[in-house]
Image (spheres, helix red, strand yellow):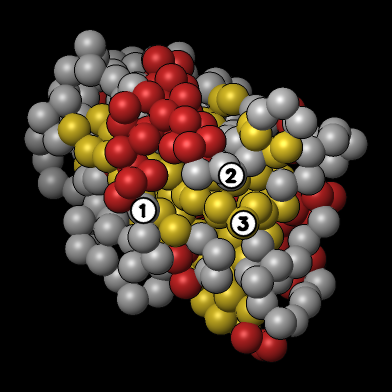
Amino acid sequence: MNPKPQTLTAVKGISVGHTTHPDAGTGCTVILCPDGAVAGVDVRGSAPGTRETDLLNPINTVQAVHAILLTGGSAFGLAAADGVMRWLEERGIGFDVGVATVPIVPAAVLFDLMVGRADVRPTATDGYAACDAASTAPVACGSVGAGTGATVGKLFGPAFATKTGIGSAARTIHGGITVGALVALNAFGDVVDSTGKIIAGAQNPDGSPGFADTMARLHGDLAGTMLAFGQNTTLAVVATDAALTKPAAAKMAQMAHDGLARTIRPIHTMLDGDTIFALGTGKADASADVSVLGAVAADVLAEAVWDAASR
């Protein structure tokens, strides 16, 4: 749970806070952008749990979001977004509809009910507390927030998985623009480094050292494996302080999935709900082509995955 010098909060206009229930193995993480940020989303996994993602479609009305919530607790955890909305509303932050100010808070969940206690899930109180804890300091990573119950390598079930958590990274590119990423790493597959070596994943059920190699096993006999439905999901936010349009934010989120594909094998399965949000705060005094931002976002997200896997 040690902070790092270059994390998502290096992006101007963003703060991050966690609420953690270590004994229950769950928690939530809020990414606040109180001045508003243009947002996009790309859902590639086939078992997602989300809220307000349709609103991010470029053809839909609202142009800015005020927070993103990543949470454990499976679908129950979406309730934590209510607390984020209440915190923002109390401060007059949101979309003015004349009779009220409505904060826009897209959210996504991961499955951690088999870690700790299944009857403890993030609530509205937890979402509110995560906002209270948010700061622009380097993000605390590891078994914290939405990553508290995160694991990877579940081919043989949770007993043979590897503990992961929250990871984050950021880079500053030409023109002083920063691109950052934060990931809650909870994948069915294994994590590999830049050489293809497994660094976190399914452990051998016979107790022998090393990793079982999920992809190699998927090519062969699946006896003894657990292809459990929807008990995984990697969630991420990539962000830049360059200005984005909604179509550009959607493209950035789409390209950032390459960072997951480079580092997690397999990814985007029927067992995962992999979801990436992209944010543009427009706080930098420079602009960049979305192809550049998306390519850098993929690299930075890969670094965040490796960070989470090393925790």
Spatial CA span between label 1 and label 3: 15 Å
Spatial CA span between label 1 and label 2: 15 Å
Instruction: Tell me where residue 252 appears, x and y as whole percent.
Output: 71, 56
Mark 1–mark 3 contact, CB under 8 Å? Answer: no
- The residue under the point 26% across, 66% down is 3
Q: Give the residue at mark 1.
A: 134
The answer to whether one can see residue 219 in this image is: no
The answer to whether one can see residue 45 in this image is: yes
State left or right for residue 302 relative to residue 190. right
Secondary structure under tag 2 reads loop
Q: In this view, does 18 lie above or below 80?
A: below
Q: Which of 202 and 3 is in front in this view?
A: 3
Q: Give the residue at mark 3.
A: 35
Count neighbours of disc 1 (C-alpha within 10 A) and say few if under 14, some if 14 to 19, many if 20 or more. Answer: some
Between disc 3 and disc 2, whose residue precedes?
Answer: 3
| Quadrant hosting residue 256 | bottom right
Secondary structure under tag 1 reads loop
Q: Give the residue at mark 2.
A: 93
Q: Nearer the viewer, residue 236 or 215?
A: 236
Q: Nearer the viewer, residue 20 or 34?
A: 34
- The residue under the point 73% across, 37% down is 96
